[in-house]
């Protein structure tokens, strides 16, 4: 999809250098991918705060139990 954007040249050049990327297109694509990834991680973090953990859970015993089932 062809798109025309007015992007600050100075900012874009700094991004190209910071990312050690070869082209402006590659830089914008990488920036969009990282933006989406960070948003998805925020969603995961919000969900993680909603779980209730058992205080009496012994993770070491549970780990050993799984190893013996293999």
Image: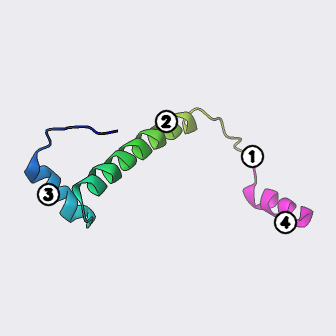
Query: Of label 2 and label 3, which has the lower sequence position?
Result: 3
How much space separates mark 4 and mark 2, taking CA atoms? 32 Å
Query: Of label 4 and label 2, which has the lower sequence position?
Result: 2
Q: What residue sits 86% from the left and 60% below the top?
A: 65
How much space separates mark 3 and mark 4, taking CA atoms? 51 Å
How much space separates mark 3 and mark 1, taking CA atoms? 54 Å
Query: Of label 2 and label 1, which has the lower sequence position?
Result: 2
Q: Is residue 68 magenta?
A: yes
Q: What residue sits 55% from the left and 34% below the top?
A: 47
Main structural element of the magenta stretch: helix, strand or loop?
helix
Q: What residue sits 26% from the left and 67% below the top?
A: 20
- Mark 3 — residue? 13
Q: Which colouring convention does the figure follow? A: rainbow
Query: Of label 4 and label 1, which has the lower sequence position?
Result: 1
Number of the front mark, 3 or 1: 3
- Residue positioned most to the left: 10
Magenta residues span 56-70
Where, by quadrant of the figure, is residue 21 drawn?
A: bottom left
Compare residues 52 and 23 and report the one nearer the observer.
23
Q: Which mark is residue 68?
A: none
Compare residues 23 and 61 and report the one nearer the observer.
23
Is the N terminus in the top left, top right, bottom left or bottom right quadrant? Answer: top left
* Residue 52 position in % (x across, y down): 65, 35
Do the residues bearing badges 3 and 4 touch, measured as CB atoms within 8 Å?
Answer: no
Query: Of label 3 and label 4, which has the lower sequence position?
Result: 3
- Alpha-carbon neighbours of circle 1 within 10 Å: few (<14), some, or many (≥20)? few
Q: Secondary structure at mark 3?
A: helix
* Residue 45 position in % (x across, y down): 50, 40
Q: Secondary structure at mark 2?
A: helix
Query: Of label 3 and label 1, which has the lower sequence position?
Result: 3
- Mark 2 — residue? 43
- Mark 4 — residue? 67
């Amino acid at each position: 999809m062809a798109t025309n954007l007015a992007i600050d040249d100075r900012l874009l050049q700094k991004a190209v250098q910071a990312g050690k990327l070869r082209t402006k297109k590659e830089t914008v694509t990488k920036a969009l991918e990282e933006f989406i990834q960070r948003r998805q991680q925020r969603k995961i973090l919000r969900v993680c705060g909603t779980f209730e953990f058992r205080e009496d859970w012994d993770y070491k015993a549970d780990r050993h139990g799984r190893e013996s089932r293999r």
